[in-house]
Amino acid sequence: MKESRFWFLFLLAGLGLFLLLGYHIVFIHLLGDYEVNIGFQSVAARSASPAYAVFYLFFLLFALYHGFYGLRTILLEIEALARHHRTITGILVVLGVGLFVYGTWALFAAMKIGAVG
Amino acid sequence: MDQPVRYNNRLGVKGWWGGRYGLERWAYFLHRLTGLIILFYLVLHIFVTSTRAFGENAWEAAMGAVGGPVFRFLEYLLIAAIAYHGFNGLRLIFVEWFGWSLGRPRRPVYPYVTSLHHQRPLLIGMMILAFLFLVFSAWGFLTP
């Protein structure tokens, strides 16, 4: 895929994040009782909901892609690192995919706990 | 014939500051700085919130470790970084994707006209929105 396509996906992920993160901040952190919202009972109830699972899956995907692509852009502007762009990209892809796999595992493991709770 | 003067255009992080930069350059600098802070927090947040998968005790222990007024204030600073990065990022999407506020293309004839005059109102408008979001957030974050 061309670099411009990856860059376009970076913009798309940023736009998606603006909406999803905005929703997350407003409804978890600002509206209602924050202590209740982050209490285990509320968290377990949200975790059991398939709609929330899809929401957080996209949230995780957009955040990791946007974040690590942005970090790659910053790193490759450093001349000494730009020579090793394949290695830098490879390391960031492994880190990003690893975090995505771990986050997705936690999402589905919590879904089971929430359904039981 | 004199050799042309070469400038190092790939200063990397060193090129973020040091120079007689205008408002847009500072917006660029802050956008990258806040981006790095948010990415660092995202990685921590993934590990902290994943503790819910290990049951109630693990979750309560994690929340206990990152609770209290100091962390609440730090979270508010993070919200400030997110508000800035989000609204400035939205401006960049408007400019780079949709071509908003660039002005009409014109020949480079003296006296030169910069497109910054067209772009700056959008920057200022977005910063006002970010500020309003921060004021709204302060009510939710900093009030007991």
Image (cartoon, coloured by chain):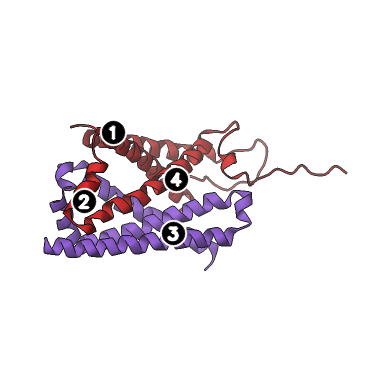
Chain colours: A purple, B red
- Where residue B109 appears, x then y in whole percent? 67, 41
Q: Are marks 4 and 1 on the same chain?
A: yes
In the picture, measured across the screen, residue A84 lies left or right of residue B29, that is right
In the picture, measured across the screen, residue B112 lies left or right of residue A5, that is right
Q: Is residue A104 above or below residue A34?
A: below
Chain to which mark 2 belongs: B
Which residue is located at x 46 percent, y 47 percent? B92
Q: Amino acid at mark 3?
A: Leu
Residue behind mark 1? B70
In this view, the residue in front, B97 or A114, is A114
Residue behind mark 2? B59
> Is mark 4 in CB contact (under 8 Å) with mark 2?
no
Residue behind mark 3? A95
Q: Amino acid at mark 2?
A: Trp
- Where residue A99 appears, x then y in whole percent? 37, 59
- Crowd rating for badge 1 (residues with CA inside 10 Å; few <14, some 14–19, many 20+): few
Residue behind mark 4? B36
Depth-wise, is mark 4 or mark 2 nearer the camera? 2
Q: Earlier in the sequence, mark 4 or mark 2?
A: 4
Chain to which mark 4 belongs: B
Q: Is residue B112 visible?
A: yes
**Which quadrant holds residue A52?**
bottom left
